[in-house]
Image (tube, coloured by chain):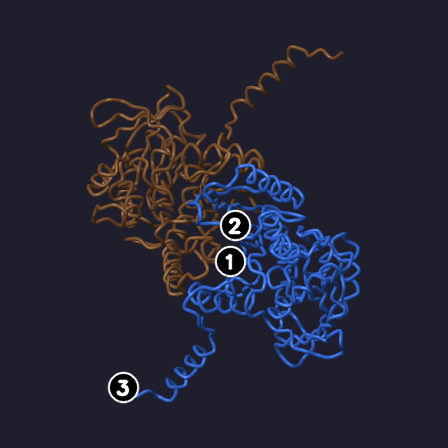
Chain colours: A blue, B brown
Amino acid sequence: MNEISVREQQVLDRIERARRRRPRVKEDRITLAHGSGGKATQTLIEAVFVDAFSNPLLDELDDAASFSIGGSRLAFTTDSFVVSPLFFPGGNIGDLAVNGTVNDLAVSGARPLYLTAGFILEEGFPVADLRRIVASMRDAAFAADVQIVTGDTKVVQRGKADGCYINTAGVGVISYPTKLGASSVQPGDAILVSGPVGEHGVTVMLARGELDIEADLESDTAAVHGLVASLLAATPGVRVMRDATRGGVATILNEVAKAAEVVDEDQVPVGTEVRGASELLGIDPLYVACEGRIVAFVSGDSASAALAAMRAHPLGASAAIVGRVKADPPGLVLLNTVFGGTRICDLLVGDPLPRIC
Amino acid sequence: MNEISVREQQVLDRIERARRRRPRVKEDRITLAHGSGGKATQTLIEAVFVDAFSNPLLDELDDAASFSIGGSRLAFTTDSFVVSPLFFPGGNIGDLAVNGTVNDLAVSGARPLYLTAGFILEEGFPVADLRRIVASMRDAAFAADVQIVTGDTKVVQRGKADGCYINTAGVGVISYPTKLGASSVQPGDAILVSGPVGEHGVTVMLARGELDIEADLESDTAAVHGLVASLLAATPGVRVMRDATRGGVATILNEVAKAAEVVDEDQVPVGTEVRGASELLGIDPLYVACEGRIVAFVSGDSASAALAAMRAHPLGASAAIVGRVKADPPGLVLLNTVFGGTRICDLLVGDPLPRIC
């Protein structure tokens, strides 16, 4: 009576195999790497959050969740911002928080409409700084044609935050007929990057003043909704888009990779200043955060139309086709290096640039 | 030609009066009181946030913003949670974060549907604690019939947060035909409170262990969507509802007050433990946060139907009619005290209970 049938044993085996496949958080305590956007973040998300909250919308793990209400297809997303320092050349935590959520909606194929803003302020934070941040949020919202419709403010004691943290959530309407998503990527697809990578990350890094490097750099923080709209209008061949924030372009390439992706390192647009600073810092610009650049996967036959559409937009003037999707080997991002070799471009381990957004 | 007409002067005078009426933040730096939900919070919101972001949806300053997309009327809200300690009798920051946003949607007359979850974690935070919090969020989402569909995780260095902060944002669908809002409150309306007040706030206060008071108390954290649905189904006379969180019932009474409100102190349900602890702490339970109680304003003739509907629901068993709206004096909340006197029940100045949610 207690014996297990062959069929039951098969089911148990399958469950056991699935359990073993599920990533586990090996650390007892949270590390900065869990916030890097790389391998540790992905493990934490899958082993803790998806494991508990699992539902079909969450499990997609796209930049925004999408669902239908009434006759409308909506996108819904959130991001918290903990960038340090709060002010840096080209922007501050305020426009970053607006652009970040606008961009998550835009790359999901949605027209961004409404944002929330939640502030966690540290006791003693200068009201004048808050005003500057809020003014930047207002300007960024105006530029992105979204409204900040509701908010929340919490204050914690001195030493329990770092000045100001901001969360934004956003809602948009999806009108693009094709369902965008990493699962629609196919061998033969082209991979496009909309502009020079790593400018935001290197700018913030240098703004900390801990390094004796000077560079004429500004964050690339910008709302990409217009660029995305141009791209979507130009071709029906767009498979999936992502905005390259934490972990940079390399992290996106890995998130999307199920087939193989072959990327030509010398095709990736990198500005001189970022290239120079990255070499001094010993970091790879491919892994450095942008806040106004997108990576787009498009069908092979629409690659040149997609590139032309991007280049016609001010934010995409330096856009480039950086690689192709191949059938094998599955799940790998291969980089043809500038030196003529090929190496695997893997997910980031650790976090060389904490609190970049 | 440069002379100003009488009419123009009148307009200028009106603008000048409005400018003077707009509250100003007098402090140079953020204080804990700015997070209290009371007078300082209201000033900060109006002088900094509304001043910058002003749009018709935000300016309503309801618990949720509402707008139409396609044929559907949606509610959208956000809250950040910084409660200390993270775990307390009856709940933790996780279910608090889910219930808080569910409740903001529910009292806006919306059926809560989808939530986002944004985590700010402090380096070194125990993964086991995160798992407990996430499990509570899962259970609370299940109980409230909502899905957590997208999220974000950031990690900050040790000493730049306090373990774990959570932001949730939520979207719901409004199906109630009447527009709810403080502006629809009229003289003659009845004021209902759905249950004993202050249990969450006093529980969290005592859980800090700084006071030598023991009480058999649990947080009242709960999702009120079912209670609200019962109330809305019972009568078309509901004017406006709010969930009594930071600043407690008294803050809501003040937020809604444009006409006068007369509240009978002895009609407000307060449990023995909360009454005892509040007396020892020298605080007024009317100002102490609940996380599962609502205040409802209903037309005078629907008061008894509303009360019966509340009492028929498990979360409203101790509901009571606590007061009435009068024509004069405008904008004041008057409290008939248990001692037979009358006093003004004003907005909170300062924050006797910081980081209660």
Task: Please name the residue that numbered disc 3 is placed on.
Answer: A2
Q: Position of residue A330 (x, y in %)?
A: 62, 79
CA neighbours of label 3 inside 10 A, class few (<14), some (14 to 19), many (20+): few
Within the image, what quadrant is residue A310 found in?
Answer: bottom right
**Residue type for callout 1:** Lys
Q: Write the residue at 58% across / 18% down.
A: B14
CA distance for labels 2 and 3: 53 Å
Q: Chain of mark 2?
A: A
Task: Please name the residue that numbered disc 2 is placed on.
Answer: A167
Q: Nearer the viewer, mark 2 or mark 3?
A: 2
Nearest the viewer among A332 and A308 is A332
Q: Which mark is residue B154?
A: 1
Q: Chain of mark 1?
A: B
Q: Position of residue A165 (x, y in %)?
A: 51, 49
Closer to the chain start, of discs 2 and 3, is 3
Relative placement, left or right, of B173 versus B89 is: right
CA neighbours of label 2 inside 10 A, class few (<14), some (14 to 19), many (20+): many
Q: Position of residue B114 (x, y in %)?
A: 47, 54
Q: Position of residue B242 (x, y in %)?
A: 39, 39
Q: Are labels 2 and 3 assigned to the same chain? A: yes
Within the image, what quadrant is residue A67 found in?
Answer: bottom right
Relative placement, left or right, of B21 versus B355 is: right
Q: Write the residue at 63% across / 60% down.
A: A289
Q: Nearer the viewer, mark 1 or mark 3?
A: 1
